[in-house]
Amino acid sequence: MALELDALKASGIVQTKRLAQLGVLSVINKPGLAGTVLGVLARQDINVHFVVETIDHDKRSHFVLCVDETNLEAALLAITSIQDRLEGEKIIHRRQVALVSVFGPHFRDVPGAACLTCASISAAGAEILAISTSFSSVTCLIEEEARERVIKSLREVFNLPESAVTTAVDGLSKRGKS
């Protein structure tokens, strides 16, 4: 089956710059994990920009999130303070990451939106560190150094003008150059 690019009309791209990735890996999965991790960050007034959790075949949870890079140290301290309760094997972090989200109407209903987004990121020579989708968007976590190449590739694949790129700043999306 060939993907029909015409069926995939993207409305735009949102980029979120200057983030840090945190991961709580191989945690014994039990109810309340997400609430516990997100709660300790919220109590420190740390906003979470991205969350992905998955459970592996050994029923261990891997929880990955992004915070503003300026909040990385405080977030690490907060999560480390509950590490014993989490019973996780490892807490990881990575600086200088970014989120790129392609959004459009009915992305959930049209096969290929995630495929084209990921293929475009690959064509830009970037590694996808995590993926999340919603009813109208595909969001990928990438290294900051690849962000401009990825935005260019996504614009080309989805035939979007530069004005379709917005930047999330202080919780708002603002139109402007990538």
Image (cartoon, grey):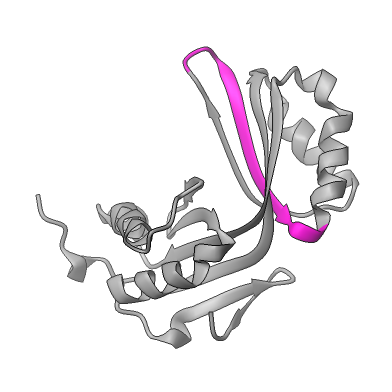
Question: Height in image: 43 above or below 126?
Answer: above
**In the shown orientation, is residue 61 left or right of residue 133?**
right
In percent of width and height, residue 141 lies at 53, 53
Residue at coordinates 11% horizontally, 55% vertically from top-left? Answer: 2
| Total count of labels | 0
Residue at coordinates 75% horizontally, 58% vertically from top-left? Answer: 69
Q: Main secondary structure of the magenta part?
A: strand
* Residue lying furthest top: 58
**In the shown orientation, is residue 177 left or right of residue 127?**
right
Residue at coordinates 85% horizontally, 27% vertically from top-left? Answer: 82
Q: Which residues are magenta?
A: 57-70
Residue 171 quadrant: bottom right
**In the shown orientation, is residue 143 left or right of residue 108?**
right
Residue at coordinates 55% horizontally, 15% vertically from top-left? Answer: 59
Residue 86 quadrant: top right
In percent of width and height, residue 104 lies at 39, 68
In percent of width and height, residue 93 lies at 70, 42
Using the image as rendered, state which of residue 160 and residue 93 is in the foreground: 93
**Magenta highlight on residue 6:** no
* Residue lying furthest left: 1
Question: Height in image: 144 above or below 41?
Answer: below
In percent of width and height, residue 167 lies at 60, 75
Q: Is residue 107 visible?
A: yes
**In the shown orientation, is residue 129 left or right of residue 16?**
left
**Magenta highlight on residue 64:** yes
Q: Is residue 40 visible?
A: no
Residue 177 quadrant: bottom right
Question: Height in image: 53 above or below 163?
Answer: above
